[in-house]
């Protein structure tokens, strides 16, 4: 357990030292949301109606900007090989990397979302459901991103391929995340049903993703 927490702490420290990646991710998220009203016009009602979907889509796209760096830097400097020879199984190494990615990317994106929701004139009754869906769904974003990052590890231009691999996996999270918020805004559906499914997606991805990611990493390290 100590080695697992130490690996997470190491990645958090490295992310803090190289804060440029987070700045780019947050900047892209902010840019997408602020440019949208310019394209759709000043209709507050329209913006409020589509706000949940826009926020979720923008968040997923923003998270992709840093997904390929999850294992890339450690692979480039040889650290990944050293970590693989350490006491932690590769599955726990993958899980630690994914959790560190969520803490350094997913959580900041989640915290800035309420401010952007105000810009999109989202119904104030949906703010709490929005944050609940983000807390339940954003870990799955990092778990699934780990699979794509491991599969494209070592490729010179793996970014576009990574996006093609990950985006289809994000679709269920996107659908049920938006559906849960829409149930509060427009009704008459239930918030609890899609929210429970969203939680289930995250739990399933937390189990499957480390296994799939570890297998891909072992293959790339051979």
Image: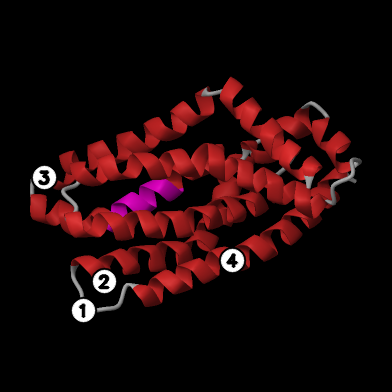
Cα separation between marks 3 and 2: 25 Å
Nearest to the eye among marks 3 and 1: give it: 1
Say which mark, if any, is on residue 188: 1
Q: Can residue 156 be seen by looking at this rendering?
A: no
Whether residue 173 sits left or right of residue 121 in the image: it is right
Q: Look at the picture and state if 125 lies above or below 107.
A: below
Callout 4–callout 1 Cβ contact below 8 Å: no
**In the image, residue 86 lies at what x, y percent?**
89, 40
**Front-most of residues 155 and 144:** 144
- Asked which secondary structure carries label 2, the reply is helix
**In the image, residue 121 lies at what x, y percent?**
16, 48
Q: Can residue 114 be seen by looking at this rendering?
A: yes
Residue lying at 18% horizontally and 54% vertically, measured from the top left: 124
Q: Look at the picture and state if 8 lies above or below 200.
A: above
**Front-most of residues 146 and 89:** 89
Cα separation between marks 4 and 1: 27 Å
- Asked which secondary structure carries label 4, the reply is helix
Label 4, on which residue?
A: 203
- Residue 14 image-quadrant placement: top right
Label 3, on which residue?
A: 41
Residue lying at 32% horizontally and 35% vertically, measured from the top left: 30
Label 2, on which residue?
A: 183
Q: Please state the extent of the stretch shown in magenta in the rendering.
A: 52-60
Of the residues under marks 3 and 2, which one precedes in the sequence? 3
Of the residues under marks 3 and 1, which one precedes in the sequence? 3
Of the residues under marks 4 and 2, which one precedes in the sequence? 2
Nearest to the eye among marks 3 and 2: give it: 2
Residue 55 lies within the magenta run: yes
Residue extending furthest top?
17
């Amino acid at each position: 357990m100590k080695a697992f927490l130490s690996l997470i702490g190491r990645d958090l420290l490295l992310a803090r030292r190289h804060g440029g990646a987070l700045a780019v991710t947050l900047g892209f998220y902010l840019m997408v949301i602020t440019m949208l009203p310019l394209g759709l016009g000043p209709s507050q009602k329209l913006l409020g109606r589509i706000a949940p979907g826009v926020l979720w889509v923008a968040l997923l796209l923003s998270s992709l900007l840093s997904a390929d760096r999850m294992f890339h830097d450690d692979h480039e400097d040889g650290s990944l090989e050293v970590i693989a020879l350490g006491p932690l199984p590769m599955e726990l190494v993958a899980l630690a990397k994914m959790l560190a990615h969520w803490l350094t990317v997913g959580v900041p994106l989640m915290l800035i979302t309420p401010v952007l929701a105000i810009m999109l004139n989202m119904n104030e009754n949906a703010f709490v459901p929005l944050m609940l869906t983000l807390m339940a769904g954003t870990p799955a974003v990092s778990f699934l991103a780990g699979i794509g990052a491991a599969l494209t590890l070592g490729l010179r231009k793996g970014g576009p391929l990574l996006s093609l691999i990950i985006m289809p996996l994000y679709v269920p999270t996107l659908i049920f995340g938006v559906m849960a918020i829409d149930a509060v805004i427009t009704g008459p559906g239930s918030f609890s049903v899609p929210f429970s499914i969203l939680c289930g997606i995250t739990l399933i991805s937390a189990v499957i993703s480390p296994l799939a990611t570890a297998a891909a990493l072992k293959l790339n390290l051979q």
